[in-house]
Image (tube, rainbow, N blue to C red):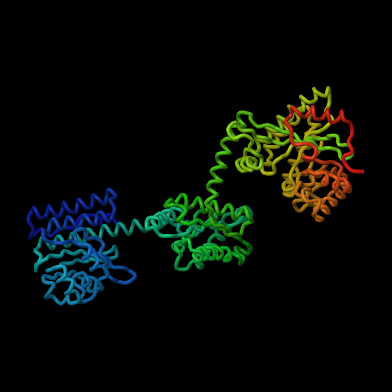
Amino acid sequence: MSDTCIQPLNIARTQLSVEQVNDLLEWQEAVLQGMAEGEAPQVLLDRLCQAAEALVPNALASIMLVNRDDGCLYVCAAPSAPEDAVEALSGLKPGPGGGSCGNVIWSGQHQIVTSTLEDPRWADLRDMAVRFNLGACWSFPVKNREGKVIGTFALTSFEKREPDDFQTNVLQVGAYLASVILALEAQHKQLQELVERHPITGLRNRQRMERDAAELFASEAQFACLYIDLDHFKEVNDAFGHVVGDAVLKQVAARFKQLTGVQEDNLYHFGGDTFIHLSQICSTADDSMGAIKGLATDFIQVLKTPFTVEGAEFNLSASVGISCSSEAQGSVIDLIRMADTALAKAKEKGRGLVQFYESHWQQEKEEKLRLDAKLRQALAGHRLDVHYQPIVDSSNGLPVAFEALVRWNDSEEGMIPPFKFIPVAESSGLIREVDLEVLRMVVEDIRQWQQAFGGDLPFTVAINLSAIELSADHVDRLTEVIRSSGVAHRLELEITESLMMQDTEESVKLIRQIKAAGIAKLAIDDFGTGYSSMGYLKRFKVDKLKIDQSLVRDIDHDPSDRAIARAIVALGKALDLTVVAEGVETETHQGLLCKEGVPLLQGYLFARPMPGEDVVGWVKERRRNGPMHVCPI
């Protein structure tokens, strides 16, 4: 709005007293001052009506606006009018018999009706005039910036009445001020609309989504939040640049808009490669939840057709996490958090999937945060420990190695099993510190054992390396400890098959760097649980394969497990790799594995993991008792 549009209206002073002119000027000044201070438009319009009523006693002021959808008039402000009167007036159809305000919209001119029961302009509203004892009604047009009539400002009396010059000026000033307030509100909405649009796709953005969700919560509507994330979109930006990436995002937005149709206003570009759709059809009923899942699936399906930008073709998929308003309990932040959590679960399961939020995840998350905090304290206080489980030679039962297993005996909770805290460490990045702490403790234990044995050890010690945090910085810290330890030749490194199968040049380089620090052997843990390849074994220069305990557990009654074990042994012989079987718990396990030619065995049948201080005694006793026939002859 231009500066001239918010200036006071010039008042014809010829027939007015000085006091009346001052009243009108002070009225305008008060309203314009409220606008300058940023008061809400509705507050200003209500105050405008109340001020007009103070200037024209025995009259009710009202502002009505035309609804663009049906063309009817609806009450926008009438603070002194009874509620039933406001309800009766709303929905007024403009026309020659539609009262003073209806005629303003119909003709575009102000209307002065001095007797509602006699004037033909009130022909369609006689019953209303009688019901509410309306004697006279004077109405002036409210216009927008382009001069189009968008509503009315009216004063209604309870008796026959003709306005004098001052009252006519009140009508003119009131209509003008209402026009100014509404024009500024429209401008504000237009600017807000621009601010609340994503610059790339033109869809409503995160700010608007949060505001709309808050309004839905306030209305107590039941709705769902569909959190849609494009899978691997970063690769498009990395390979082709952001210009191409932005063009793809525009095409994605266009498909989503076509899919949502009339619900386009509930579609938001949340940022980056994420979109949100708020659907108001969600309830606890199975059919409604089914409809929500169907819509989420449609968002995934609509991306199946390849995208083409500058001659390049792109195939995209998406994952969708869903939360419901009933679970968020009025919190927009929780609504988004829950949907984002569900999205992460969908991606964990393989991407391109739909996942509803499940309430027990919050408890799991809180437990994870609690464990994370306690684990940080345990690391800082060096309160982790290492236990060792022997690996024995199947030909004589003597130990040839020990596997180092991290243990955490908490002062409050007792022994916390690794399957609980290791995933927490991996997800938080603490696993790097756990790896280093275990390595330092193992090195110190080996040094002490060497003194007990009066020289070098008769066995090696295997430590596990997490696949989650294999980075150059982490490997540099590990190799520094290994090189400076003086016992590198007694260390083995165990990596999981999943790490090996990443098959990246960086992974190969880092593992070889650790091996070059002087460790004795490199072993593949949990072998046989993935899609193994001899090519991986060659690239990583592996020395040992460990048959996973899941294959050993049922080997006595599952022919396929036994066949896999036999194949791994054959592979080991062909590639000159040592084979170890984990999880040997029964003599039946032992006999079958020996029969298949497995040279090394590990499991509860021989010993449970033991503290470091028990290792020397256990080894000496085992050697003192002499060779044992572990495998039946």
Asked whether residue 619 appears in the rendered view, the answer is: yes
- Count up the numbered dots: 0
> Residue sitting at 69 percent across and 35 percent down?
406
Q: Name the quadrant of the N terminus.
A: bottom left
Q: Name the quadrant of the C terminus.
A: top right
Front residue of 111 and 467: 467
Residue 85 picture location, percent across and down: 21, 65
Residue 118 picture location, percent across and down: 11, 75
> Residue sitting at 7 percent across and 60 percent down?
15
Asked whether residue 516 appears in the rendered view, the answer is: no
> Residue sitting at 15 percent across and 53 percent down?
25
- Residue 123 image-quadrant placement: bottom left
Q: Please state if 190 lies on the left or on the right of 604 as rendered.
A: left
Q: Please state if 261 lies on the left or on the right of 565 as rendered.
A: left
Q: Please state if 511 lies on the left or on the right of 272 as rendered.
A: right
Q: Residue furthest front?
A: 587
Front residue of 358 and 108: 358
- Residue 429 image-quadrant placement: top right
Above or below for 449 versus 390: above
Q: Please state if 392 lies on the left or on the right of 164 as rendered.
A: right
Residue 362 picture location, percent across and down: 53, 47
> Residue sitting at 66 percent across and 35 percent down?
434
Residue 56 picture location, percent across and down: 12, 59
Above or below for 115 versus 399: below
